């Protein structure tokens, strides 16, 4: 009897709240992302994925009016910081998202969450924000930075390779990547090389690599660096003798367009792929192609999921973003159909999710990814235990 | 005579009063974020002014000024990092810990930047023209990669500060108080620069800019004067760096990147080289224009880029020369005669 | 030993690539006394034009054939429309104006071609590798790059030392008024030199296309390297640009190839890798600072 009563009052409260919200102001969402200069393809994909979810609902999220404010950070930390300050102080945003790069996230997120604004990361997942400095206002929809590398490490080990050559740029995400890989791969190491960030020419590294005679190569070279490496790897004829592995960042759809057939056969770890079979994903891929006339990338899927997560939370709270406790509660529930299938948050508000292995294939004349297996089920990141939440 | 002086001093005074009232007005208008924006402008104005000393008055085109700016920021960042985590900065031969005190960290930032400028200047001033532009760039790039190599301090990512510096009775975490402090620095430095430029040192420096050979023939130790100016400019840039680390509560190697040097250079030229208020005007115009355009369209650079070209082509002397012309037109022209 | 030979080839290849960029830049800097930061933009535009033509027609060579004149014409229009007013301004104005152009071209390319990186394939007859020394398969395309670069160097040498145009260029660099008095249209001469420089940059961009990523901002990373080459070699000197380019190419490649290993002899591996990578990035700047400190006008001062 008591339970019933409670249930009734909750329903009534939801109904009341939603009528109130119908007259309330739109929920303000700020997006600071990279739209100009190098690496702008990633930010544009996140924004377009997010916008698609809004457009699918005819301009609302979870049935509630939203106001999306977008600003370009040009990949510069202090510009991101300024744009975020402006959104928090001038526009009074309730929720923020959009940052692509870990170094920008480290600059912006601590300040934003301190101002009691919810930050939902659609891409960057630096370890410091997942562990020691986790925060109740910080959510990550994509992954913790190490996740995909850990999955690849597991997969390479399962394949029976025991002499791997590894390459990453000389910056924190690069060292984290190889650490993540080695957390699950415990075989021999033929070489561990750190290259300059933004490096384009890998002739010297490839010559040394050939000389080391590894039985597999693992690279973490996001963006243009990956394109250059893949092409040069193929031109040196190495793709025919040593299998290449990587995280999805080096082989996402935006990269494959430029890397071309040189990337065929490469296997990579990803929490999403456009051929994953679930209704949410099918609708997303179809609508994305229709709206933007290109294949969606990993980043677009993350932007889309971010918007869908917000939609689910707004629906649950009746569009009342001002009650942060309720909003956080609703976000934590993650009650939405992710395009990657099963999705839930761990204690540090980072995803617990399956991670798949994909292979780069030629499909109707287009170079793209195909799922070939699962590396991890319900994977939890390594820093969750450091988070006291 | 006193009248004349009053008229001449009136615009800067009005200007200072307007700036001083800014936080009050911004709060009243519910536009509190403008305080942060203005603080940022003032800090870059300090950086641009320091470059102006060597560029505008000394004729030395340095494309590596961000090195001193960024180093100053890192000094504050590194000391705060050690204070935060309690790890000593150095155990041998002396035990030195970190600190969040502005009274220690900021002068140290100035000192480190000044020393760097002294060394870099001593080598770079052997060259001139394009070679000078490039060698200053080279040194800045070296420092850029040096800070990337410092994994403990975040490497390429940089690091967040958890607090602004402690400065006695002032609470710098309060945006308004921090603004007034930065404003005080700006005005004091403008005044000092005014005095310096009109001193014997300043006259010799501009003399070297206009005709180094003649000055050398007159027996002035040209390079020593240049080096002194270069070091001084580096020191002031270091202060600006210490302030920006506090303003953004963040330091990163991008503070030393060559594009940042280029931006500071643009601020000086945009505002007007070799003028007292030019760099301030340039910094304000540059940052506010950038922000307004970026708000307007994601393709803002397609407007911003050609605008720079147009300024160079048609507005020689920068924005300050427009102000001067306006002043002359309004009857201040009597001064010239 | 074989590995060392291969690394030398790699250094050589990076060197000739830099030479293609540096030769144009040094000509323009030496003759018109003009600092063109937008030189990297021509490199980018060349690559993008070639990539889109090649994608439409399937022919790399056709892409090359369209991209070179297209970029040169764009550059000459820009020069006679706006940039030639900057020749007698000081370097600072030039740096600013052309910095603005970089921003403009980056955004323009993004509007025209989109933000995602682009694709330019190696021509079929240059894919695969060649064993020039037995046991060292070397990508045929990189060999072709070396050959092209050396051919351009030879062509420029002949053009400047042996042709009438070259004589005018040399004379124009040292005495503008005199060449003008000889009845030579100096304005046209400058426009042609500017076009030639842009064409060489576009050639570098097209050649780089199949190896590197064709993407926005690709011009900036090579631009700085190019300036290092020009300054190390001595502004205005083709010979200097050639020597500087090979020197920088070799130092950069060797630094990346051997510094981490050498440091591993003395330091723990993790520190050595990190420090080695950073030192390798710094190596060319250190080299430049040392050279300029010892020879303030570069290795081969052009005049005076």
Image (cartoon, rainbow, N blue to C red):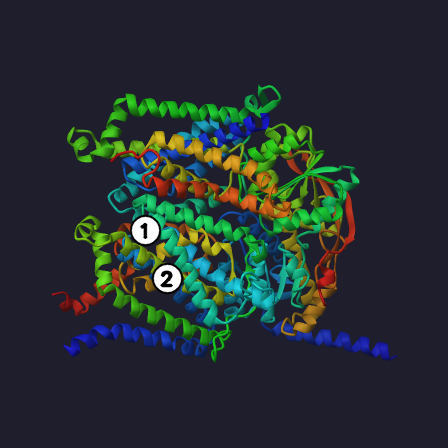
Q: Nearer the viewer, residue C157 or A189?
A: A189
Residue B92 visible, this orientation? yes
Left or right, residue C268 beside residue B145: right
Q: Quadrant of residue A383?
A: bottom right
C88 in relation to B19, above or below: above
Indicate the quadrant containing the C terminus of chain C: top left, top right, bottom left or bottom right: top left
Residue at the outermost left position:
B337
Q: Nearer the viewer, residue B97 or A281?
A: B97
The residue that label 1 is drawn on is: B61
Nearer to us: label 2 or label 1: 1
Q: Position of residue A99 (x, y in %)?
A: 58, 57
Q: Nearer the viewer, residue A129 or C281?
A: C281
Q: Position of residue A306 (x, y in %)?
A: 65, 58
Q: Position of residue B1 (x, y in %)?
A: 14, 77
Label 1 environment density (alpha carbons within 10 Å; few <14, some 14–19, many ≥20): many
Label 2 environment density (alpha carbons within 10 Å; few <14, some 14–19, many ≥20): many
Residue B38, numbered label: none
Label 2's element? Answer: helix
Say which residue appears at 55% left-offset and 35% top-offset. Answer: C119
Indicate the quadrant containing the N terminus of chain C: top left, top right, bottom left or bottom right: top right
Mark 2 or mark 1: which comes first in sequence? 1
Residue A296 visible, this orientation? no
The residue that label 2 is drawn on is: B283
Left or right, residue B93 beside residue B186: right
Q: Position of residue B239 (x, y in %)?
A: 41, 65
A293 in relation to C128, above or below: below
């Amino acid at each position: 009897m008591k339970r019933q009563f409670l249930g009734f009052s909750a329903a009534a409260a939801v109904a009341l709240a939603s009528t109130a919200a119908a007259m309330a102001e739109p929920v303000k969402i700020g997006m600071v992302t990279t739209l100009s200069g190098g690496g702008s393809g990633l930010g544009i994909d996140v924004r377009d994925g997010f916008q698609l979810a809004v457009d699918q609902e005819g301009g609302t999220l979870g049935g509630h009016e939203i106001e999306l404010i977008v600003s370009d950070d040009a990949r510069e930390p202090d510009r991101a910081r300024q744009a975020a300050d402006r959104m928090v102080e001038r526009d009074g945003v309730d929720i923020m998202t959009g940052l692509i790069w870990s170094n920008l996230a480290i600059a912006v997120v601590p300040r934003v969450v301190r101002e009691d604004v919810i930050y939902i990361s659609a891409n960057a997942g630096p370890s410091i924000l997942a562990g020691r400095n986790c925060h109740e206002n910080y959510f990550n929809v994509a992954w913790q930075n190490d996740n995909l590398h850990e999955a690849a490490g597991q997969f390479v080990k399962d394949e029976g390779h025991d002499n791997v050559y590894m390459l990453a740029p000389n910056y924190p995400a690069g060292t984290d990547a190889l650490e993540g890989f080695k957390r699950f791969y415990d075989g021999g190491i033929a070489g561990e090389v750190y290259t300059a960030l933004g490096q384009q020419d890998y002739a010297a590294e490839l010559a040394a690599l050939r000389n080391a005679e590894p039985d597999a190569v693992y690279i973490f070279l996001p963006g243009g660096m990956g394109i250059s490496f893949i092409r040069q790897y193929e031109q040196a004829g190495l793709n025919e003798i040593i299998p290449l592995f990587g995280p999805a960042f080096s082989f996402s759809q935006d990269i494959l367009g430029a890397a071309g057939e040189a990337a065929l056969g490469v296997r990579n770890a990803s929490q999403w792929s456009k051929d994953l079979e679930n209704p949410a994903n099918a609708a997303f891929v179809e609508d994305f192609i229709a709206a933007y006339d290109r294949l969606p990338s990993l980043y677009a899927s993350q932007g889309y999921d971010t918007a869908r997560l917000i939609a689910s939370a707004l629906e649950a709270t009746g569009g009342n973003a001002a009650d942060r406790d309720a909003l956080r509660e609703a976000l934590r529930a993650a009650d939405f159909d992710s395009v990657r299938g099963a999705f839930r948050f761990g204690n540090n508000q980072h995803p617990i999710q399956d991670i798949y292995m994909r292979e780069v294939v030629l499909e109707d004349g287009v170079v793209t990814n195909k799922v070939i297996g699962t590396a991890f089920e319900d994977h939890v990141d390594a820093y969750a235990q450091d988070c006291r939440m | 005579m006193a009248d004349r002086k009053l008229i001449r001093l009136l615009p800067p005074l009005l200007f200072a009063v307007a700036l001083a009232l800014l936080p009050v007005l911004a709060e009243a208008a519910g536009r509190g974020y403008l305080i942060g924006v203005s603080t940022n402008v003032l800090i870059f104005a300090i950086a641009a002014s320091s470059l102006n000393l060597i560029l505008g008055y000394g004729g030395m085109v340095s494309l590596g000024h961000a090195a001193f700016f960024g180093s100053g920021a890192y000094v504050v960042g590194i000391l705060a990092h050690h204070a935060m985590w309690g790890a000593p900065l150095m155990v041998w031969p002396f035990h030195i810990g970190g600190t969040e005190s502005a009274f220690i960290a900021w002068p140290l930032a100035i000192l480190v930047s000044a020393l760097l400028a002294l060394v870099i200047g001593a080598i770079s001033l052997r060259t001139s023209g394009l070679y000078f532009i490039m060698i200053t760039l080279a040194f800045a790039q070296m420092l850029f990669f040096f800070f990337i190599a410092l994994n403990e301090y975040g490497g390429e990512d940089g690091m967040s500060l958890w607090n602004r510096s402690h400065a006695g009775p002032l609470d710098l975490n309060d945006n308004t108080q921090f603004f007034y402090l930065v404003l005080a620095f700006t005005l004091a430095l403008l005044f000092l620069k005014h005095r310096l430029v009109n001193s014997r040192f300043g006259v010799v420096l501009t003399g070297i800019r206009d005709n180094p050979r003649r000055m050398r023939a007159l027996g002035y130790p040209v390079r020593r004067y240049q080096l002194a100016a270069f070091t001084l400019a580096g020191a002031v840039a270091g202060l600006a760096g210490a302030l920006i680390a506090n303003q953004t509560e963040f330091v990163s190697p991008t503070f030393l990147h060559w594009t940042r040097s280029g931006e500071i250079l643009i601020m000086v030229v945009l505002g007007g080289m070799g003028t007292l208020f030019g760099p301030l005007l340039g910094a304000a115009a540059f940052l506010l224009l950038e922000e307004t355009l970026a708000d307007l369209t994601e393709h803002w650079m397609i407007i911003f880029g050609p605008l720079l070209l147009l300024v160079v082509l048609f507005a020689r002397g920068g924005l300050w020369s427009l102000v001067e012309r306006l002043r002359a037109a309004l009857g201040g022209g009597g001064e010239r005669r | 030993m074989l590995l060392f030979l291969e690394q030398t080839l790699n250094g050589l290849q990076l060197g000739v690539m830099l030479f293609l960029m540096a030769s144009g830049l040094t000509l323009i800097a030496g003759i018109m006394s003009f600092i063109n930061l937008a030189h990297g933009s021509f490199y980018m535009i060349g690559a993008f034009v070639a990539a889109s033509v090649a994608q439409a027609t399937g022919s790399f060579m056709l892409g090359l054939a369209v991209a070179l004149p297209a970029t040169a014409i764009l550059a000459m229009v820009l020069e006679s429309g706006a940039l030639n007013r900057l020749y007698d301004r000081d370097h600072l104005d030039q740096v600013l104006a052309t910095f603005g152009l970089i921003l403009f071209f980056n955004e323009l390319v993004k509007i025209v071609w989109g933000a995602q990186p682009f694709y330019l394939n190696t021509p079929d007859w240059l894919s695969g590798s060649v064993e020039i020394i037995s046991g060292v398969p070397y990508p045929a395309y990189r060999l072709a790059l070396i050959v092209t670069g050396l051919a351009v160097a030879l062509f420029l040498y002949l053009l400047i030392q042996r042709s009438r145009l070259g004589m005018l260029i040399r004379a124009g660099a040292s005495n503008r008024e005199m060449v003008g008095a000889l009845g030579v249209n100096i304005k046209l001469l400058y426009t042609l030199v500017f076009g030639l420089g842009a064409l060489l940059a576009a050639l570098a961009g097209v050649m780089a296309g199949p190896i590197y990523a064709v993407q926005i901002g690709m011009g900036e990373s090579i631009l700085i390297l190019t300036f290092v080459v020009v300054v190390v070699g001595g502004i205005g000197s083709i010979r200097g640009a050639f020597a500087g380019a090979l020197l920088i190419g070799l130092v950069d490649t060797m630094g990346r190839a051997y510094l981490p290993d050498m440091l591993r002899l003395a330091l723990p591996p993790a520190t050595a890798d990190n420090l080695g990578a950073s030192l390798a990035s710094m190596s060319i700047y250190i080299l430049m600072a040392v050279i300029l400190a010892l020879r303030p006008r570069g290795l081969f001062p052009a005049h005076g």
